[in-house]
Image (cartoon, rainbow, N blue to C red):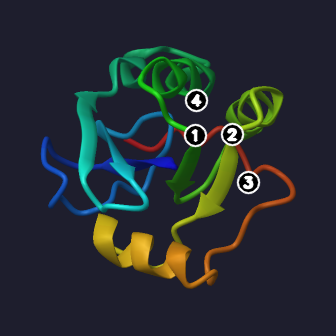
Amino acid sequence: MNIAFCLKENSIESELDGRFGRAQWFGIIDSETGEEVSLFENTAKEEPSGAGSKAVQLLLSNGAEAIIAPEFGPKAFDALKRFDLKLFKQGDHKTVFAALKAWRSGSLESPAAPGNSGLHKA
């Protein structure tokens, strides 16, 4: 399964970003092999509104089947559910490989509802 992660920098070794729609970069990893599938800038991050929904479209066009992220705002959550993408909260994990290990062990939460807001964090 191709799993997307929110990254602070242009590297799969980067720390995970604390935002979804306004994350700086996205990385997609093959969950079976741990290999990088793709790494790309989140061009939706500059949108004045709806960054989460546009980020969902970007991830879909790059082959994501699941997303591990800190939180999902209401619009992003609805878009992710509409396209049947699997959602997981990254929790306190700071790296892709720590979050991937937690996902493999089944310890990541799959949110049943969106987070508090469309998270407009700078």
Rendered-image quadrant of the C terminus = top left
Left or right relative to 8: residue 81: right
Whether residues under marks 2 and 1 lie with C-beta atoms below 8 angstroms apart, the answer is: yes
Q: Which amino acid does label 2 sit on?
A: Leu
Chain-order first, disc 4 or disc 3: 4
Whether residues under marks 3 and 1 lie with C-beta atoms below 8 angstroms apart, the answer is: no
From the viewer's perspective, is the residue at label 2 or at label 3 nearer? 2
Look at the numbered disc 2 and give the secondary structure of its residue: loop
The residue located at (49%, 43%) in the rendering is 20
Q: Nearer the viewer, residue 121 or 90?
A: 90
What residue is disc 2 on? Answer: 85
Q: Which amino acid does label 1 sit on?
A: Glu
Distance CA(mark 1)–CA(mark 4) = 16 Å
The image shows residue 71 at horizontal and vertical percentages of 61, 55
Q: Nearer the viewer, residue 111 or 18?
A: 111
Look at the numbered disc 3 and give the secondary structure of its residue: loop
The tag on residue 115 is: 3
What residue is disc 1 on? Answer: 65
Left or right relative to 79: residue 27: left
Distance CA(mark 2)–CA(mark 3) = 17 Å
The tag on residue 52 is: 4
Q: How crowded is mark 2: few (under 14 residues within 10 Å), some or many (20 or more)?
A: some
**Looking at the image, is 94 positioned above or below residue 54?**
below
Q: How crowded is mark 1: few (under 14 residues within 10 Å), some or many (20 or more)?
A: some
Q: Residues within 10 Å of mark 3 (few under 14, many from 20)?
A: some
